[in-house]
Image (spheres, rainbow, N blue to C red):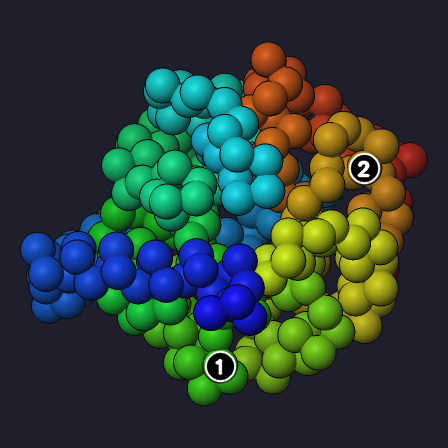
Amino acid sequence: MSSATVLDSIIEGVREDVAAREAIVSLAEVKAAAEAAPAPLNVLAALRAPGIAVIAEVKRASPSRGQLANIADPAELARAYESGGARVISVLTEERRFHGSLADLDAVRAAVRIPVLRKDFIVRPYQIHEARAHGADMLLLIVAALEQPALESMLERTESLGMTALVEVHTEEEADRALQAGAKVIGVNARNLKTLEVDRDCFARIAPGLPSDTIRVAESGVRGTGDLLAYAGAGADAVLVGEGLVTSGDPRSAVADLVTAGAHPSCPKPAR
């Protein structure tokens, strides 16, 4: 198994955890709960509104950095993000490496009125219905984690439940696969999930090749307003920020600073 990547290792654990949950709550039960959940919010409208949208993340830990923050009350953090002007709240629900949970998703969904993204390693249809059952409006699909037929069927299923997919890529080839699958929102992650190495030029390389009607999200590497402006200049419609907020000491102000920078008349606007 020496050739196994970090991503392979994470997915192996995710598959085990999903199987354990499905043994307790069946797919049929999760589907019924998803159908009974309140209708999802309009994520595309939130991301297309004027200015650079900030997707603020509830993130306790990561494989690359270990423990980041002791978040005793994810609902309180989410409310701080919302009051700072975040357009979407991202919630990590992967347990082993990111120390997240579906309980975090429940708490955040109940606390805010803006769209909520379930950020996890989605490899089974069960997880898509599970996300909707727990109130997610948006779902992360990672191209590197899915073969093309699976990516296409997962995207179709996500949209059939009224959710929006954030389709994550790290290379031009993955971006082509995302577009082929029909992705409307593409996130470019500067971090290679197979090695955890960061390539900050990744977004600037990939974004110009995306169609103008694609919503382009820059993921990883936003520590402050300078990073947001650089991504905006390269064509970002939105930035996803986690570590830079949870380690800031004042998450509401940290979000507000980014939102203000992204709304400033001098902020570069993507050509449409």
Label 1 CA crowd tier, 10 Å (few <14, some 14–19, many 20+): few
As drawn, which residue projects farthest toward the top? 249
- For the residues labelled 2 and 1, say whether their Cβ atoms are less than 8 Å apart: no
Residue identifier under label 2: 227
Visible residue check, residue 199: yes
Question: Which numbered disc covers residue 229?
Answer: none
Question: Is 245 displayed left or right of 30 in the figure?
Answer: right
Question: Is 77 displayed left or right of 193 in the figure?
Answer: left
Residue 198: percent from the left, percent from the top?
A: 73, 50
Residue that appears at 26% across and 36% down: 103
Establish if 221 lies above or below 4.
above
Label 2 CA crowd tier, 10 Å (few <14, some 14–19, many 20+): some
Question: Is 31 displayed left or right of 192 in the figure?
Answer: left
- Of labels 2 and 1, earlier in sequence is 1
| Disc 2 secondary structure class | helix
Residue that appears at 85% across and 64% down: 205
Residue 206: percent from the left, percent from the top?
A: 79, 66
Residue 149: percent from the left, percent from the top?
A: 45, 86
Q: What whole-number distance in Å separates the C-alpha atoms at marks 2 and 1? A: 32 Å
* Closest to the observer, 19 or 49: 19
Residue 49: percent from the left, percent from the top?
A: 65, 46
* Closest to the observer, 74 or 183: 74
| Image quarter of residue 9 | bottom left
Establish if 47 lies above or below 246.
below
The mark tally for this picture is 2
For badge 2, the amino acid type reads Asp
| Image quarter of residue 12 | bottom left
Question: Is 150 displayed left or right of 208 in the figure?
Answer: left
| Disc 1 secondary structure class | loop
Mark toward the viewer: 2 or 1 = 1
